Amino acid sequence: MYPTGSGLDTARSWGLDRVDVRYQAEMDGQYAWSYSGDGVVAYVLDSGINNVGDLAGRIDAHMQCWSADASCQSSTWGATYGEFDVDYDGHGTPVASILGGSLFGVARTVRFKDVQIWSAGVGQSWSNTNNLIKALNWVVNDHVGRDASGMAKSVANISHQYPGTYDAVDIAVRDAVAAGITVVVGAGNDGVDACTRSPARAGNPNMIPSNPNGFSAITVGATNRFDSVVTFANTNGEPVSWASNGGQCVDIFAPGHDLRATGRYGTQITFQGTSAATPHVAGLAAIRLEKYGFLDPAAVESSIKSWATSNVLTNLPANSPNLLLYTMQPRTRICCSY
Ligand SMILES: [Ca+2]
Ligand SMILES: [Ca+2]
């Protein structure tokens, strides 16, 4: 039903067109991939994923983590909690679509688990860090439950930020990484140093409390179609009302401005922000996990960063890495007809 293995498709968003090549001049209007995230579970900690568009039939669990319950609750999409039980906000659906949708996604055969940390404004309070912590705890248990040896292939996408730093949030990220889950986090859209935000700062192992083993997330900033980091001063003829966070808690940049994805009603929408950049990287993490069978999160991160395109970005915030996501994977042909 969905493409597997390698493939080539019209790039329905400039971000897909950009990440499969090294340089602007090579953009050809297409997106090519040699792995699609087979066998990988993508946990999307967000406003929910609707079973629509290029995500239909791809979601294997639906967890509600925004109520006052001590732990996340399994629920039936659209039924258990009524209108709150779907992606009412319209954020999580395009995030998932960019990560792995069959039309707009980077990793087109990944399976999803929808871990809803807010809905229709419920639980989205900036002071409410408990939902994300509950969600990460559930993800760790589910990941371990899939393979007691800790070798399940898992990526968690968190396109969500709080307006300050919260030790408990970053410690929960640390514990998920320690369990073997590659955690990918948005840098945030405030135009500030990402080290002043949680969980964005968890991209830098030195910013996570009690972290002797140096675990960290992969924190992602956002670029536009001209390979400029999105800043308030950015021109290029495209208005911006937000700016990517930057600094030494950011690991890598990816397309995050004026993108296309499946929206909550199943139709194509425009979507942007570091929320949109992050799932591009999470998609590549899924591709890496398929390609190598299993990698621990540190190996996934180092492979993505060492394979990234260096020194093509402009308007880089101070102390940020000049690294742009590059997804194309060399693939050894297993058989004989060329
Ligand atoms: Ca391309
Ligand atoms: Ca990192």
Image (tube, grey):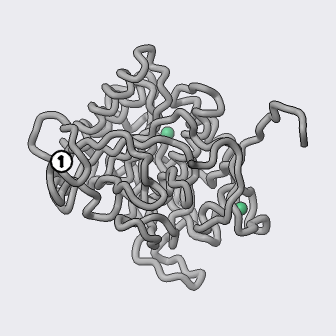
User: Is residue 314 among the parts visible in the rendering?
Assistant: no
The residue under the point 65% across, 57% down is 19
Query: Which quarter of the rendered picture does the C terminus lie within?
Result: top right
The percent coordinates of residue 228 (x first, y second) are 60, 68
Q: Residue furthest front?
A: 1
User: Is residue 19 among the parts visible in the rendering?
Assistant: yes
Residue 234 horizontal side relative to residue 31, left or right: left
Res 82 quadrant in image: bottom left
Q: Residue furthest top?
A: 149
* Residue in the foreground of this view, choosing between 299 and 113: 113
The residue under the point 20% across, 62% down is 120
Is label 1 in a helix, a strand or a loop?
Answer: loop
* Residue in the foreground of this view, choosing between 39 and 330: 39
The percent coordinates of residue 75 (x first, y second) are 21, 42
Residue 281 against residue 335 in the figure, above or below: below
Q: Residue furthest left?
A: 68
User: Residue tagged by mark 1?
Assistant: 66
The percent coordinates of residue 242 (x first, y second) are 41, 72
* Residue in the foreground of this view, choosing between 139 and 87: 87
The percent coordinates of residue 302 (x first, y second) are 60, 35
Residue 50 horizontal side relative to residue 290, left or right: left
Neighbours of disc 1 within 10 Å: few (<14), some (14-19), many (20+) = many
The residue under the point 47% across, 47% down is 219
Residue 166 against residue 225 in the figure, above or below: above
Residue 149 against residue 209 in the figure, above or below: above
Asked if disc 1 is less than 8 Å from ligand 2, the answer is no
Residue 163 horizontal side relative to residue 53, left or right: left
The residue under the point 30% across, 36% down is 136
Amino acid type at circle 1 is Trp
* Residue in the foreground of this view, choosing between 106 and 301: 106
Residue 204 horizontal side relative to residue 164, left or right: right
Q: Give the quadrant of ligand 1.
A: bottom right
